[in-house]
Image (cartoon, grey):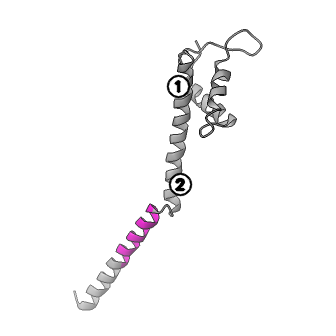
């Protein structure tokens, strides 16, 4: 390998190295779009998990079993556990809005975390 080829190879390596370093710095600063997207998915799932954990905790504090909730039908006698849990959950404004509570409740019903007797 002659001197010109060595210089070209070194120059190419330096550019690659510099590019990688810049990408790493931008990623650390949260500037890469795909990195931001991945982080928001992680943050989003984390918030959903926190919502689900809060709902389970509220149910347990009311002395109910999340896997054996008393059935409730509107207009009939019965305990509206969902309404009771919703009241408490909506006090946690950093985690819940009415819409996010409904979504979390339905998600948990669907995955089997919440069941009627």
Depicted 117 relative to depicted 109: above or below: above
Q: Which residue is mark 1?
A: 57
Q: Secondary structure at mark 2?
A: helix
Mark 2 closeness class: few <14, some 14–19, many ≥20 residues within 10 Å: few
- Farthest residue to the top: give it: 77
Q: Is 71 part of what is drawn in magenta?
A: no
Q: Nearer the viewer, mark 2 or mark 1?
A: 1
Q: Main secondary structure of the magenta part?
A: helix
Q: Is residue 114 left or right of residue 6?
A: right
Image coords of residue 87 (percent x, y): 67, 26
Which is more toward the observer, 35 or 91? 91
Of residue 54 and residue 27, the one placed in the foreground of this image is: 54
| Residue 22 among magenta residues | yes
Q: Which residues are magenta?
A: 15-28
Quadrant in which the N terminus is drawn: bottom left
- Is residue 35 left or right of 99 when viewed as pictured? left
Quarter assignment of residue 99: top right
According to the picture, the residue beneath numbered tag 2 turns out to be 37
């Amino acid at each position: 390998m002659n001197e010109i080829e060595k210089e070209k190879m070194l120059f190419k390596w330096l550019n690659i190295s510099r590019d990688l370093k810049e990408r790493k710095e931008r990623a650390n600063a949260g500037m890469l779009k795909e990195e931001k997207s991945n982080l928001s998915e992680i943050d989003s799932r984390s918030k959903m998990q926190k919502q689900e954990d809060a709902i389970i905790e509220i149910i347990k504090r009311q002395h109910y079993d999340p896997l054996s909730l008393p059935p409730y039908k509107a207009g009939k006698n019965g305990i509206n556990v969902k309404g009771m849990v919703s009241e408490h959950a909506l006090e946690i404004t950093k985690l819940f809005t009415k819409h996010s509570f409904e979504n979390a409740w339905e998600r948990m019903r669907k995955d089997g975390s919440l069941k009627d007797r």
